[in-house]
């Protein structure tokens, strides 16, 4: 066989081997990339479930609740989920408490469509009895609206402090909001201790937390600073979404009892985190979870009303 022919055959063989290697490498890269993408998609929710779990039991109920809205009407509809306002000790009650949209659905198909809101187990909710899961933390939030906080304005959180509610033996945890000139609204880095001089800790502590404001800013600050309560995005627990807020008035101490076992569903279109005015929608339904409840369901009827199927109104 001529030397040229042998060299040509060897070159063809090497080319085929190289091509096969590149194909194999490409497929391996695509497989790894696909696996990474899949992990990236599910990691936030998985991380939330793991971080929030308080029991290692394999069959334990996940620390969350669900609220499903079914659209039986003849037209596509959008729905928003809002938290109920907290109650305040009488010595420091805000002039205005604003609701913010916690979650918002896309358009839900008519007659057969549904959307399920996922609600993390937060402070201010009854625990899941029989599951080993206690009530979660309370998320105190602060930030600046940057403009007059009218309905439709979206609020963003600049700082968060997690607090534990009082247990009926001593006051709940407290935090202090501060905003010196040139700085964003933020909380003191250390949680304030429970007040040992509380005159009636049993009455004042059950289910409460404290949010205080110092005198480092002025009440006429053009940034419109606020404090309030938030909740984590169930698909991205690092994002805390405003739930209820009020103006941060300097030198105040708010003793707050969250009411995050009661949620409000409205037929409306709105942005997550935006201030919501109930006057803009007459189609609402209030759903309360009692201890042991993990799911609720409401139907949006053809006549534009809600019907509660599961849960307590």
Image: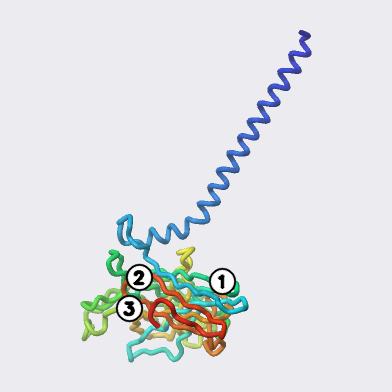
Image coordinates of residue 305 in percent, x first then y, are 52, 85
**Residue carrying label 1:** 112
Q: Residue at x 60, y 74 (%)?
A: 110
Crowding at dot 2, Cα within 10 Å, few <14 / some 14-19 / many 20+, comes out as some
Q: CA distance from mark 3 to mark 1?
A: 42 Å
Picture coordinates of residue 231, whole percent (x, y): 43, 72
Left or right of residue 213: residue 19: right
Q: Earlier in the sequence, mark 2 or mark 1?
A: 1
Query: Dot 1: what SS?
Result: loop
Q: Is residue 19 above or below residue 218?
A: above
Foreground: disc 3 or disc 2: 2
Asked whether the beta carbons under mark 2 and mark 1 sit within 8 Å of each other, the answer is no
- Element at badge 2? loop
Give the class, few, some or many, for how many residues have Cα within 10 Å of label 1's Cα (few <14, many ≥20): few
Question: Residue 17's mark?
Answer: none
- Placement of the C terminus among the 4 image quadrants: bottom left
Between the residue at mark 2 and the residue at mark 1, the CA separation in whole angstroms equals: 36 Å
Residue name at image x 60 percent, y 43 percent: 30
Residue at image mark 3? 209
**Residue at image x 50%, y 88%?**
220
Q: Quadrant of the N terminus?
A: top right
Task: Confirm whether residue 159 shows in the render.
Answer: yes
Quadrant position of residue 17: top right
The disc, 3 or 1, on the residue closer to the chain's N-terminal end is 1
Q: Few, some or many C-alpha atoms within 10 Å of disc 3 (few <14, some 14-19, many ≥20)?
A: many
Which residue is label 2 attached to?
Answer: 137
Q: At x 33% / y 55%, what residue is drawn?
A: 58
Residue 301: x and y in percent read 54, 81
Q: Is residue 59 toward the left or the right of residue 280 in the image?
A: left
């Amino acid at each position: 066989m001529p030397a040229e022919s042998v060299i040509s055959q060897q070159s063809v063989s090497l080319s085929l081997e190289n091509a096969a290697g590149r194909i194999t490498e490409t497929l391996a890269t695509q497989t790894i990339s696909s696996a990474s993408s899949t992990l990236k998609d599910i990691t936030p929710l998985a991380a939330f479930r793991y971080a929030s779990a308080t029991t290692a039991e394999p069959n334990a109920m996940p620390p969350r609740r669900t609220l499903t809205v079914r659209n039986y009407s003849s037209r596509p509809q959008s729905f928003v989920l809002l938290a109920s306002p907290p109650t305040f000790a009488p010595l420091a009650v805000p002039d205005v408490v604003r609701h913010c949209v916690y979650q918002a659905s896309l358009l839900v198909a008519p007659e057969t469509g549904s959307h399920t809101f996922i609600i993390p187990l937060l402070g201010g909710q009854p625990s899941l009895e029989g599951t080993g899961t206690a009530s979660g933390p309370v998320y105190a939030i602060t930030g600046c609206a940057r403009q007059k906080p009218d309905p439709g304005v979206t609020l963003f959180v600049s700082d968060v402090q997690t607090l534990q509610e009082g247990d009926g033996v001593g006051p709940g945890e407290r935090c202090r909001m501060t905003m010196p000139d040139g700085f964003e609204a933020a909380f003191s880095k250390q949680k304030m201790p429970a007040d040992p001089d509380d005159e009636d800790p049993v009455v004042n502590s059950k289910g409460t937390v404290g949010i205080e404001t110092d005198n480092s800013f002025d009440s006429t600050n053009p940034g419109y600073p606020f404090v309030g309560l938030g909740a984590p995005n169930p698909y991205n627990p690092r994002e805390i979404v405003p739930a209820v807020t009020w103006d941060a008035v300097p030198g105040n101490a708010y003793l707050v009892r969250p009411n995050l076992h009661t949620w409000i569903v409205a037929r409306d279109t709105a942005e997550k985190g935006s201030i919501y005015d109930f006057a803009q929608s007459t189609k609402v339904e209030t759903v309360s979870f009692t201890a042991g409840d993990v799911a609720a369901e409401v139907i949006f009827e053809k006549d534009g009303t809600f019907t509660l199927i599961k849960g307590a109104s």
